[in-house]
């Protein structure tokens, strides 16, 4: 089952989204995107947990 997430899921005004087969791969893509496009977001354990809670299964 595919996993997906988008910035809009987190209330951001950003059209980025991603879909993969695993949470680990998806979180890798999310991390890359946050570090390049949303530098104001600190990837601490609380924010990572919040991001993971937004992942949808398709």
Image: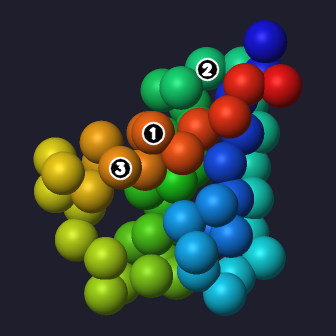
Q: Of the residues under marks 3 and 2, which one precedes in the sequence?
A: 2
The CA distance from mark 3 to mark 1 is 5 Å
> Residue 49: where, in percent of width, then height?
30, 42
Whole-number angstrom distance, CA of label 3 to CA of label 2 = 17 Å
Q: What element carries label 1?
A: helix
Q: Distance between the residues labelled 2 and 1?
A: 14 Å
Q: Are marks 2 and 1 in contact (CB under 8 Å)?
A: no
Residue at the outermost right position: 58
Task: Give whichever of discs 2 and 1 has the lower sequence position.
Answer: 2
Is there a contact, CB below 8 Å, between mark 3 and mark 1? yes
Position in image of residue 31 (x %, y %): 43, 56
Q: Name the residue under label 1.
A: 53
The structure residue drawn at horizontal position 54% and vertical position 66%, both measured from the top left corner, is 10
Mark closer to the observer (2, 1): 1
Instruction: State the residue at coordinates (58%, 75%).
Output: 11
Is residue 28 something one can see in this rendering?
A: no
Can you identify the residue that label 2 sits on? 22
Residue 55 lies, with reference to residue 34, above or below; the image says above
Give left or right: position of 22 versus 43. right
Residue at figure coordinates x 45%, y 69% from the top left: 34
The residue lying toward the viewer, choosing from 16 and 35, is: 16
Q: Looking at the image, can residue 52 be seen?
A: yes
- Could you say which quadrant of the image residue 40 lies in? bottom left
Query: Residue 47, percent across and down?
Result: 27, 57
> Measured from the top left, where is residue 53 in percent x and y?
45, 39
- The residue where tag 3 is placed is 50
Label 3: which secondary element: helix
């Amino acid at each position: 089952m595919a996993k997906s997430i988008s910035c809009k899921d987190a209330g951001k005004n950003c059209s980025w989204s991603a879909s993969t087969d695993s949470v680990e791969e998806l979180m890798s893509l999310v991390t890359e995107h946050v570090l390049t496009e949303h530098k104001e977001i600190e990837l601490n354990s609380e924010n990572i947990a919040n991001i993971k809670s937004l992942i949808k299964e398709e």
